Image (cartoon, helix red, strand yellow):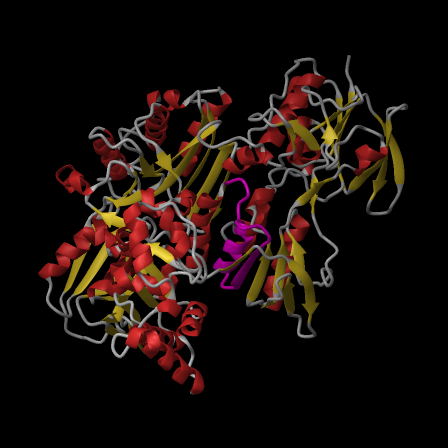
Amino acid sequence: MSKKIVIVGGVAGGASTAARLRRMDEDSEIIMIERGEYISFANCGLPYYIGGTIEERDNLLLQTPEDMNSRFNIDVRVKNEVISIDRDKQEITIKKLDNNQEYKESYDVLVLSPGSTPLRPPIKGIDAENIFSLWNIPDTDKIKSYMDTKKPKRAAVIGGGFIGLEMAENLHDKGLEVFIIEMADQVMAPVDYEMAQIAHNHIRSKGVKLVLEDGVKEFINKNDGSTTVVLQSGDKIETDMIILSIGIRPNSELAKTAELETNKRGGIIVDEYLKTSDDNIYALGDVVEVIDFNTKSKTMVPLAGPANKQGRIVANNIVGRYEKYEGTQGTSIAKVFDLTIASTGINEKTLKKNNLKYKEDYFVALIHSKSNAGYYPGAIPMTIKLIFDKTGKVLGSQIVGYNGVDKRIDVIATAIRFNSTIYDLKKLELAYAPPYSSAKDPVNMAGFTAENILKGDVDVINYDEIETLDISNTIILDVREDIERQLGFIDNSINIPVDELRKRLNELDKDKTIVVYCAIGVRGYIATRILKQNGFKNVMNLNGGYSTFSCMDCNDDNCSTEACSADINYDEAGNLENTEDTERKTVKLNACGLQCPGPIMQVFNKMKELEEGDILEVKATDPGFMSDIKTWAERTGNTLISTKKEENSFLAILKKGSSIVKTQNKEVINPKEDKSMVVFSGDLDKAIASFIIANGAASMGREVTMFFTFWGLNILRKDEKVETDKSFMDKMFSKMMPRGSKKLGLSRMNMAGMGSKMIRKVMNDKNIDSLEELIKKAQENGVRIVACAMSMDVMGIKREELIDGVEIGGVANYLGAAENSDVNLFI
């Protein structure tokens, strides 16, 4: 018996339901009602039409009402809005939006797929004509028309979700100066912070201003058409147009009025067959509450993929081919400039929110692998985060990279859908040829790494756990090569390259915890295995290596990854017309496929063959090369002329020697201007001199590091006695040494302490700051005060005995600061 089926909503879910229904049932009457002018349009493609990537507007229209009627014999009514449902009569009231005429339509089965609407909070000034949301074709036309007529030069995107980031990219591609304002501490909510941070750095490297952890307080609209965005922090951003992308709400008013069951967020509650609380009404898409496939809890996931699949299931159930909807997994992917960011399953934030404990309830493997075989051109790293439970079941994954991300996330998404484990991932036989993958695919590698963790072959530590370590009982072991260490290292670490480790095991204390790290984790794993099999019990490898650790420390003020390329001459043409020399030899070096430290090592070796003033053009595929080469050039006295991002690689042009180069008609000098000093003496006069010099250098804008060792440590001791657990020898040392700066004596004319009292009085009479005031000012001026960990151990001084604000560090800490200093004092 034929039915009369009415579908409310004609975009993703509604159109899919209608088409599937007709394929399964040729006789039923199918009516699809859409309040907008367009049906089945490609809403995910709207930002790319605005940016010009999609040139033809008609390409966004996947089906027209006329085409759908012709092919599927469906009565499509656009610009008609359903305004009420009479469930008892099985009848709806419809308004024609062209003339406001109302009419009624009966139904045997009603399908609700009304979608959702962008949030537009009651912020002062939000109704200005230059403030837009992007959700449908009319929104797109308004934005495109505004840009064509007003020619804006600046744009602010409010919200760092999918649409916000895609709009930021496309506005940037149109030549606008772009700001992204996000209230959370990261963009892309489906991924965890360390993965989002890769995107943050990449976004900044494009010249886009990224404002995190700040919201909009007010829009001040000016007579010239521009707007001042006033943030909650008080900061202000001047812009010509604004895109709102701060979330959505389900269009469930119709369901609520009809007294269908809804949740607190307004989502329509449906059963496993997508039927509402009324047996004659189904619902799907953005408007419904679904089961989270991963956690089995109730949630709402507004994604086009699930909506289309739900449409097929609803149609099957209506015609009697009963099928359950088993839940939404949340697999998603986005292009963010050159990067691809993808996720599936549960993220770590959700696990922590549900009070699950790391290393008890779940584990994390973080690896950096390549898109294809390293020896084949175009091999670019990707970062994979794999989350799994103690049985090995895969819970979720996130991947950030340039090429091949979609393939790997789909493999892992499939594994999750079929309840696979990390042991299944390592067994997968995936397509391999050098242009596409490696013999051990990145998904296999993630499985291998996860197995190593669960089997106890390696214990891992995450980047955010490093700062919680007790440095007095921990050795942080850098197993990279010396040239890599020059590019940066973790504070308090010591360096033993992995290939030298077996011969130098006697330098390490087996009673201490050893945290091992390398560039990406592979050599760290090898070093960990060497140590564990040589009697070292408590050994951990840094998850993701120094690459992940250093990325976490990058922001607008402190950037250590590829975003730093914004600070150098980014020459799109890669020309050398602006360089000082006109006669020079140019040598090309291909370091593609090599992972850190490969490209830098190649540059180092090639530079030794060149003469002063020669030019080296280096091509690499490691994204970290962009920042590494800048740091390397600065520290080796060579000149980085320009960098350039090509399609599948990065190009750097260097000149051997000379830290002065003319770029863009400017003379750029990269001198070492920091100051460092070793404070060995514990004499009052020398301590005063040290802090006077430190404060003077800090006042000139220099970075200053003071490294206190042996007798100098007494300057940093608290005046009052601190109860600590010490050995007899340590207690004897403490009693014989001055406790704090006020007990220090003079190096000469001390006269049993009278000399120090006299000099303090003279300083007071002449309004000269006391030593204690100088120390306080130094800390306020940002001077780094570092106490030598080894000397503290020898002298029997504990951390709690030192004044607040003192770092504990080793000699590597000091040497790192000394390398960047043009003045280095020993006092």
**What's the magenta region?**
165-191
Q: Position of residue 212 (x, y in %)?
A: 54, 55
Q: From this view, report whether residue 48 is shown above or below residue 771.
A: above
- In the picture shown, does residue 548 fall above or below 326? below
Instruction: Examine the structure image and report whether residue 128 is included in the region drawn in magenta.
Output: no
641 vs 165, left or right, is: left
Where is residue 226 shown, x and y percent of the image? 64, 70
Residue in the image at 68% along x and 19% along y: 273
Left-right relation of 211 to 256: left
In which image quadrant can residue 390 be found? top left
Residue farthest toward the front in the current orientation of the protein: 752
Relative placement, left or right, of 424 versus 106 is left
Give the position of the N terminus as an image quadrant. Answer: top right
Whether residue 602 can be seen here? yes
Q: Between residues 422 and 78, which one lies in front from this camera angle?
A: 422
Q: Residue 254, relative to residue 570: is it above or below?
A: above
